[in-house]
Image: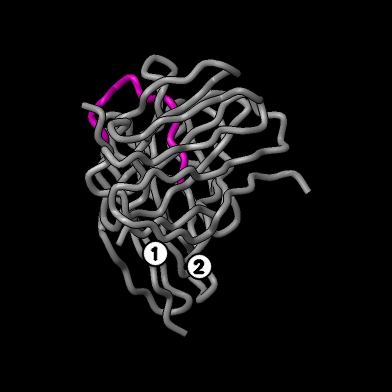
Amino acid sequence: DGGITQSPKYLFRKEGQNVTLSCEQNLNHDAMYWYRQDPGQGLRLIYYSQIVNDFQKGDIAEGYSVSREKKESFPLTVTSAQKNPTAFYLCASSSRSFTGELFFGEGSRLTVL
Amino acid sequence: QQQVKQSPQSLIVQKGGISIINCAYENTAFDYFPWYQQFPGKGPALLIAIRPDVSEKKEGRFTISFNKSAKQFSLHIMDSQPGDSATYFCAASSSNTGKLIFGQGTTLQVKP
């Protein structure tokens, strides 16, 4: 089945540690995105990539980093510089940037202790 | 300019009733307005979408009404069912801005 796989589903980390969230898609989509979801704030865009080896900052990129070395993969690193990292993180992909359907993974819930 | 404002934050409807969720936007360059449905512990999934050249789009029990002059659009769920209980997000984007902006979300509970 085609889709987006995020891992891990749940992650606990201590303050000051970097963590990397995995996102893999087999939909042959060019564009991939990372969103952060907090209660009452909707989905906020962290980073997006429209093509391999290229990515752009979204609205809340501070404290995060990404790479896009392969079309299928778009990992997100939550660095120790992110002041409030506890959140639900969603990865998505689309065949057309933003004006077409986004396909989301099931999310990764990060809790920083 | 980039915001999409969604209301209400939460909604309780009896089975068989009509659920209505409203969104408003400022940026007149927006030209794509999707609605996403999210069940607990899952990622959102596209429910229905509309472009501003039409005032209404219907798919089964779900209808988007679009008012370009008022810069508002809404989701109507007819004959609401307990299985419709979920969080709903409106969104907007344009080819100019290159970003999909989401509303704050509405948690819908349909009581049996």
Q: Which mark is residue A61?
A: none
- Which residue does the image show at 40% across and 79% down from the upper left? B14
Amino acid tagged 2? Asp
Q: Helix or strand or loop: what does disc 1 sit on?
A: strand
Q: Which mark is residue B84?
A: 2
Closest to the observer, A10 or B67: A10
Tell me which corner region of the image, top left, top right, bottom left or bottom right, holds residue A64.
top left
Q: Are marks 1 and 2 in contact (CB under 8 Å)?
A: yes
Question: Is A7 situated left or right of B21 in this image?
Answer: right
Which residue matches tag 1? B19
Question: Is B32 situated left or right of B73 in this image?
Answer: right
Could you tell me what secondary structure mostly forms the magenta stretch? loop
Nearer to us: label 1 or label 2 = 2
- Which residue does the image show at 47% across and 40% down from the upper left? B34
Q: The numbered mark 1 sits on a residue in which chain?
A: B
Closest to the observer, B58 or A104: A104
Tell me which corner region of the image, top left, top right, bottom left or bottom right, holds residue A23.
top right
**Colour scheme employed for the rendering of this structure:** one colour
Kindly tell me whether residue A78 is visible in this rendering.
yes
Question: Is A96 situated left or right of B91 in this image?
Answer: right
Amino acid tagged 1? Ser
Tell me which corner region of the image, top left, top right, bottom left or bottom right, holds residue B12.
bottom left
Q: Which residues are magenta?
A: B25-35
- Which residue does the image show at 42% across and 73% down from the upper left? B17
> Total marks drawn?
2
* Quadrant position of the N terminus of chain B in the picture: top left
